[in-house]
Amino acid sequence: MYVDATVGGGGHAAEILRRSGPDGRLIGIDRDPEALAAAMVALAAYGSRAELVAGNFAELGSLLKSHAGRVDGVLFDLGVSSPQIDRPDRGFSFQSDGRLDMRMGGSNLTAAAVVNSYSQARLAAMFREYGEERESTRIARAVVRQRQSGPIATTEQLAAIIRGTRPVMPAKTLARIFQAIRIEVNDELGSLRLALEQAQGLLARGGRMAVISYHSLEDRIVKQHFRDRAVVCTCPPALPVCACGRSGPTLRVVTPRPVVPDERERQDNQRSRSAKLRAAERT
Ligand SMILES: C[S@@+](CC[C@H](N)C(=O)[O-])C[C@H]1O[C@@H](n2cnc3c(N)ncnc32)[C@H](O)[C@@H]1O
């Protein structure tokens, strides 16, 4: 049994079902109802072999509790999907105009609430930490100054404020600030940490988890998680119970270096450029 924890439009899920035929089963999870509707169409041909579940992968353990220890593979393809980025009304892109929303689904916080209510210091810290942006303080100051004359409601307004902080503004900076807000709105890093821990408990021995990440913050979390769990119990054999906390299921790292797209894939699919795939096997 396989789990696609970010089923999106069902592309990866369909390939997993095709390759695990005729009996392989898959549970596809997504927090975005629109993604689930698209996946339902894409996976219809697989009938009862595919099941779709609405939810946040931060709750993977409870969403799949009846399958604990029996899963052969868990896939995470992190971040936002192309349909989410390309729909202006979802508010993810600085390249089109839409309401400042950025919710993937299931979150009460919107991007508008973040930019209009967070203090300057909190905005600057968020831009620095989640966007890894050097101009964080200057941009946070500009956001706070601008909102004094009325709430910031659209992606275009926010993009104009960011652009106004430098004579020539690289697109990279805009992307970083939008990324930071998106991570905050959807608690992306917190969800990932929780999910990795739970995925391990679902896997059967020899089962694998694979994670595709798109920026260094996510990749660092995945790399560190795999590394930490690859260490076996370090307690002295005489100790009656484990005190180091490493006696649970451990992982063997399958990809000492992340797998990245080759030149052809990067050209065919521009959005794959920053992708890094890491995999680990439950021992
Ligand atoms: C990059 S897309 C996945 C695309 C998918 N692999 C495909 O083949 O179409 C990421 C998907 O993960 C979903 N997602 C992101 N974070 C999530 C979370 N914490 N819980 C559940 N779904 C999440 C998004 O809504 C989005 O649909």
Image (spheres, helix red, strand yellow):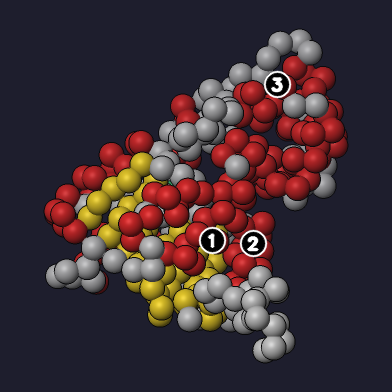
Side of 90 relative to 54 (left or right): right
Question: What x and y, as percent, mark residue 214?
Answer: 56, 57
Q: CA distance from mark 2 to mark 1?
A: 9 Å
Side of 39 relative to 177 (left or right): left
- Helix, strand or loop at label 3? It is helix
Quadrant in the picture for residue 41 = top left
- Helix, strand or loop at label 1? It is helix
Q: Which residue is mark 2?
A: 221
Query: Are the residues flagged by discs 2 and 1 in contact, CB closer than 8 Å?
Result: yes
Question: What x and y, as percent, mark residue 179?
Answer: 63, 43
Q: Which residue is mark 1?
A: 196
Residue at screen point 28% across, 42% down: 38
Q: Which residue is mark 3?
A: 116
The amino acid type of the residue labelled 2 equals Ile
The amino acid type of the residue labelled 1 equals Leu
Nearest to N terminus: mark 1 or mark 3: 3
Q: Is residue 33 visible?
A: yes
